[in-house]
Image (tube, rainbow, N blue to C red):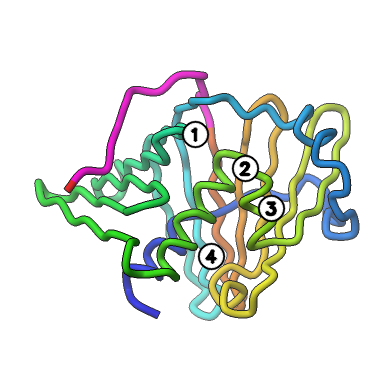
Amino acid sequence: MTNSIKIVAIFILLAMPIFANVFEHPLTDIKSADKIIHSPEKISGDFRQEKVMTSLGVTLKSEGKFAISKSQGIFWQNTKPLTNTTIINGERICSYSGGQLTTIDSACNEMLKNMLNMINSVFTQDYDEMMKYFDLYFTELDGAYELGLRAKDAGLAAVIKQMRVSGSSYIESIEFSDASGDITTIYFSNIIENAENFSCTK
């Protein structure tokens, strides 16, 4: 697996589970879940990310700002501990760091293209796309929900074994674990239903 694909896979992470047994409840009615999970065309806000590296006993932390647009993709700007910006859509990933732009196109890399589509599907709540990669599970209590995703493919499971997406009015956290037992969690806050335009350009 190339470094670029690993970077993309690491990008996605995390959530504190609301329901410990979400994976005991397969999602059978997508329309009902869609009524509970609020998924605007555009949202933006702040994030805080923690990656627990189990084998090393180390937790890596970062924070910054994000935007999600169903038409444009994902804007991810780290402000601490390092400053860089990443934009992901179904066609390419762009990274801005130190005034330098790096672009990776997925046109000739089917694995990278699938990874980008998978990332976008989770953040934009595209169930049809998510179901290409994951078995879905769902629980809801008093307006709070947890969506569970378990990788269908062994290759994907080596990178992302399962995910938990939690929230109420908006997405509040995403957690994912890999085959090695490492867990990454992203917490979202200060969310608004708007986002400035952004693009991934060469």
Q: Is residue 39 above or below residue 126?
A: above
Amino acid type, mark 3: Arg
Amino acid type, mark 2: Asp
For residue 70, which numbered disc appears in the image? 1
| Mark 2, other Cα within 10 Å: few <14 / some 14–19 / many ≥20 | some
Q: Is residue 2 above or below residue 46?
A: below
Q: Nearer the viewer, mark 3 or mark 2?
A: 2
Earlier in the chain: of badge 2 and badge 4, it is 4
Q: Position of residue 70 (x, y in %)?
A: 49, 34
Q: Are marks 2 and 1 in contact (CB under 8 Å)?
A: yes
Earlier in the chain: of badge 2 and badge 1, it is 1
Q: Nearer the viewer, mark 2 or mark 4?
A: 2
Q: Nearer the viewer, residue 52 or 162?
A: 162
Give the residue at mark 2: 126
For residue 164, which numbered disc appears in the image? 3
Helix, strand or loop at mark 3: strand
Amino acid type, mark 1: Lys
For residue 52, which numbered disc appears in the image? 4
Q: Nearer the viewer, mark 4 or mark 1?
A: 1
Q: Nearer the viewer, mark 3 or mark 1?
A: 1
Kindly report the distance in space between the C-alpha atoms of the residues bearing marks 4 and 3: 15 Å
| Mark 1, other Cα within 10 Å: few <14 / some 14–19 / many ≥20 | some
Q: Nearer the viewer, residue 144 or 54?
A: 144
- Check if residue 197 falls in the magenta segment: yes
